[in-house]
Amino acid sequence: MARNDHLLSVGNEALTPMTSAMTALSTQIDQLTEVADARSSARLATLKTKMENFTASVTLVGQVKAGKSSIVNILAGRPALLPSDVNPWTSVVTTLNINTRTEGDKRAKFTFFEQEEWDSLMVGGGRLGELANRAGADDEMEDIRRQIGEMKAKSESRLGQHFDLILGQSHQYDYFDDELIQRYVCLGDEDDPDINPKTGRFADVTKSAELFMDIPQYPISLKLCDTPGVNDTFMVREQITLRSLRGSEVCVVVLAASQALTTMDMALMRIIAQFENRQIILFVNRIDELSDPVNQVPEIRDRIQDTLKQNNIDANTSVVFGSALWAEAALTGNPDILTEESREALNTFYLAAGFGDQAPSLDKIWALSGLPDLLLAMNERIADGAGTRLLDRVRHRARNIASQIRATAVAKNLSDGQGVVRDLDGVPPEEAIAKVTKEYDKKAAELTTTLRDKVLERLKSSEANFVKRATDSLIAHLEQNGEDGTWQYDPAGLRTLQKAAYFSFARSMRKEASALYSTAATDVEALYQKLLGNHLGEFSIEAPIVPRVPPPLGIGRTIALDLQSTWWRRWWQRRKGFEAYAADYTRLIASEANSITKDLEENQIAAVLENVRAGLSDFLREQAETLLNISASAEQDPGQAALMAGLTPKKSRDDILGDILKDLSNEAA
């Protein structure tokens, strides 16, 4: 760790309410466990494990050489961890697992592409080849095949006889250092004589890299994901970056202050446009390179807000300005690393911040670096997002388990099953319980099928509407201008329609799943009341929490209509006649629109609907187990019932349960 790693603690105040709530909730679960039977104790232990394993995921994306790796290094407290001084260095999605539990002494893990993934790249050119094939871009496909051949030859030369054996495997180490990391994640510059020949040996075939470390300054576990640019040669990394973002709580977009914002990779803008505003943080790095930072920063902020607005991103998205170089100087305690220009910019900021009458200090340099603001913004989003959702889920489950403990205890204390109903509506309890479970399993299947059909119908309608408008526009262009020149139709309208369809699906899912869950909980609670009647006293079973709908990141992936390079002009020049233009373009645009729908269906909608079914199924299974246990207690002899009741007096147990339920309910309010 760096000399002044205590600086990483700045911003932790945003996490204090969350961590305090987790500690209190853990204590309440321990109290519940003291009066629980074996089955409920196991469930409570699972809840504690979920809290203990809570890990917030933060993914950094951005422009090439904007300083993503430098920022990750600072956040890890290790300024030289991931190399960032050669262009291009980072070629692999690299995740730093901070304060997470590991298997044994594992400190590094490098995973290679599966054989199927590699074959897809080698034979079809990956995603870029897929797009070129759909567009009929034969010349570009030849270029792709040539580059693939060069890449394959280079990889086989580096790996030799091990090449075929390595695919689908992973390498694990109980350490990591610069040389090891560079061997797997860095392409570097082959023409640089100073580069270690081992550098990048596995980089072409490395799919992901994971490093594991402990940083006591962070009160929670974190996953920091450093991504390469999303527009790599074959768009393989775009898919991996999207996969990383799908599970991410916070997306930090790193920009370079000196780069024109309008040149920001549009693929990046398309992706972050799908996030909720609260999940995005823009970190404008390298303000130390500005000639007049005090006046330029407000101008850059205005340009950023305009660009966000043009791309349908909330202009109120959090924007933080800073310098990784200043942060490194503060963290290492070594201001000598600053260039003369960087020192001048720092002095200008120092005076503008009102520190002119104060002696220079590392704490103030750290504050001006923007890293404290970035950490605070990250922690606020973690606490308000994933942290709050976890606490809500655990409290909810704990309250239901407490109710189950109470019901089980009541049944076990009823001598010889007295007061426990042996049949429900004329059938054995087992049959009545199974009937309710089967009924709601069927309803959940019907609901998810209906939701899926509705959203796919709307997505297909969006496709058809967009294709018609685009084709009509093309024909109008041809009628007015003939076949001279080229024409391009912006696919932003398609994404807007599909995003609207997805969010309509999300609203319907939340409303209808909530209603189904609620009636299921009411019917389950009725079974408890029928079994135990007025012996239960105050008693309730809460409905499961409706699953979260993640942002539709698949909408942001690159499609052929986004590619406005030379291939589009060639596509245009190869067509002759209005009918050929219209027919071929209709096929192309319909295929590209359908590819987004397919991605949404397979990677987003299917997962949401499976969570809807699983949430209800898990709830019903757990409640059925408790109800069947209560029913079985009616068949015990008095001695066994007394033994099962345990040593805790009934009144004491009820008092404990009542107090815990009250605390859990008050904290949730």
Image (tube, rainbow, N blue to C red):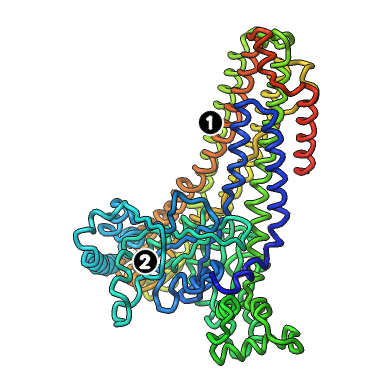
Q: Is residue 44 above or below residue 345?
A: above
Q: Give the Cα separation between the discs numbered 2 and 1.
A: 49 Å
Closer to us: 576 or 334 = 334
In the image, residue 328 lies at what x, y percent?
A: 56, 77
Are there few (<14), some (14-19), or many (20+) residues within 10 Å of tag 1?
some
Residue 180: give its label: 2
Q: Residue at x 67, y 24 (%)?
A: 524
- Can residue 526 be seen here? The reply is no
Residue 51 visible in the displayed image = yes
Q: Which residue is mark 1?
A: 445
Residue at the (64%, 32%) spot, across then down: 516
Residue sitting nearer the eye, 581 or 130: 130
Give the x, y percent position of residue 342: 57, 88
The residue drawn where x is 30% and y is 58% is: 121
Q: Quadrant of residue 305?
A: bottom right
Residue at 50% across, 76% down: 66
- Which residue is at the front of the view, 44 or 254? 44
Q: Nearer the viewer, mark 2 or mark 1?
A: 2
Element type at mark 2 = helix
Q: Which of the 4 image quadrants contains residue 648? A: top right
Among all residues in the image, which is located at the extreme left? Answer: 161
Left or right: residue 247 versus residue 301 is: left
Amino acid carrying label 2: it is Leu
